[in-house]
Image (cartoon, rainbow, N blue to C red):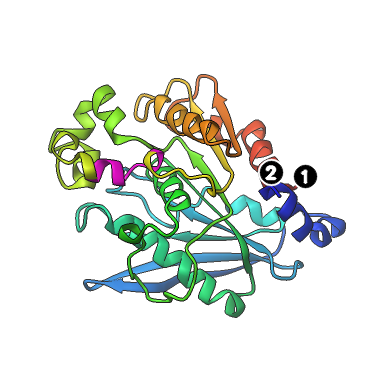
Amino acid sequence: MSIGRIWGVVLLGFLALGAKAETEVRAFRDIVFAEVDGQELKLDIFVPQGVESPPLVMNIHGGGWSGGNYKDSSFQWLTAHGFAVASISYRLTDVASHPAQIHDCKGALRWLRANAGKYGYDTSYVVVGGRSAGGHLAALLGTTHGVDALEGTVGGNLDQSSKVDGIIDFYGATDFIQRSKTQPEKTDKPSGIVYRLLGGPVKGNKRIAKQAGAAYHVSKDDPPMLVIHGDEDPQVLIGQSERIVDVYERKGLEVEFLVVEGGGHGGEGFQSPEVRNAIREFLGVE
């Protein structure tokens, strides 16, 4: 059963009531879900009122793994459609390199599952999504359930699953080996964002580069994925999205690919009705 059909059933009661233009939302802000090497990792949770145990979308922020903030949520608008939304932080590359970032994301998801009853959302089905660096981490999280080296122990709650049921990847990198051929200034120079993520150049760290790329982890039990990318993106070339889509298709997995014509690296085009309609359709809501 696809993510859309599953969540369509979950949200049927809410939709019968009719989603209001301004749904009342209860916000829980700046919750510490873990502390690593003296750094607090925090998250915000937004829970729509009027729907019992809403399903969860977990947002991972962008910023080249070196910036950005969990206050920047790409999916908070989904509370008006009956979803709870959590937006999480992770260690940036000024303090830690891969796999710290994916360890933190999985730790946040396990914490969210362990505390679902306290905050009033449902984690039977969870979708993870993000933009740019957040898209990379969302795709990596969604394709690496059970990969021991990428699970980590951040935040504890190791009895909880890090498996998700859907991935929304906005223009995230998925193959750093490929990227070292098309954008070596980002992957093999000390000033490059991928160099800082991996703790060294791709050319000298191919094993780590493959470990950090979702394209190298796709298996037949991976969840449905929605990929969104601008065809004029100068920061993360569209070939990164084409790569993961190709791997998904070859594995026979469910994947949808929306190309934003004239789209760069973010911007208003990614807030368009077309994009939001694609996300709603992926999630199975009107």
Relative horizontal placement of residue 208, taking residue 52 as reference (left or right): left
3D distance between C-alphas at marks 2 and 1: 6 Å
* Type of amino acid under label 2: Arg
Where does the image place residue 209, in percent across and percent down from the top left?
Answer: 25, 41
* Local crowd size for mark 1, using a 10 Å CA cut-off: few (<14), some (14–19), many (≥20): few
* Local crowd size for mark 2, using a 10 Å CA cut-off: few (<14), some (14–19), many (≥20): some
What residue is rendered at 66% in x and 31% in y?
Answer: 274
Bounds of the magenta segment: 208-215
Instruction: State the quadrant of the C terminus.
Output: top right
Q: Which residue is mark 1?
A: 286
Q: Are marks 2 and 1 in contact (CB under 8 Å)?
A: yes
Relative horizontal placement of residue 244, taking residue 93 as reference (left or right): right
- Can you name the residue that lies furthest to the right here? 16
Where does the image place residue 9, in percent across and percent down from the top left?
Answer: 78, 57
Is residue 106 on the magenta stretch? no
Q: Taken as a whole, is the magenta stretch helix, strand or loop?
A: helix
What residue is rendered at 71% in x and 58% in y?
Answer: 82
Q: Tag count in the figure?
A: 2
Residue 219, above or below 160? above
Where does the image place residue 5, in percent across and percent down from the top left?
Answer: 74, 49
**SS of the residue at dot 2?**
helix
- Can you name the residue that lies furthest to the bottom here? 118
What residue is rendered at 33% in x and 57% in y?
Answer: 150
Q: Which residue is mark 2?
A: 280
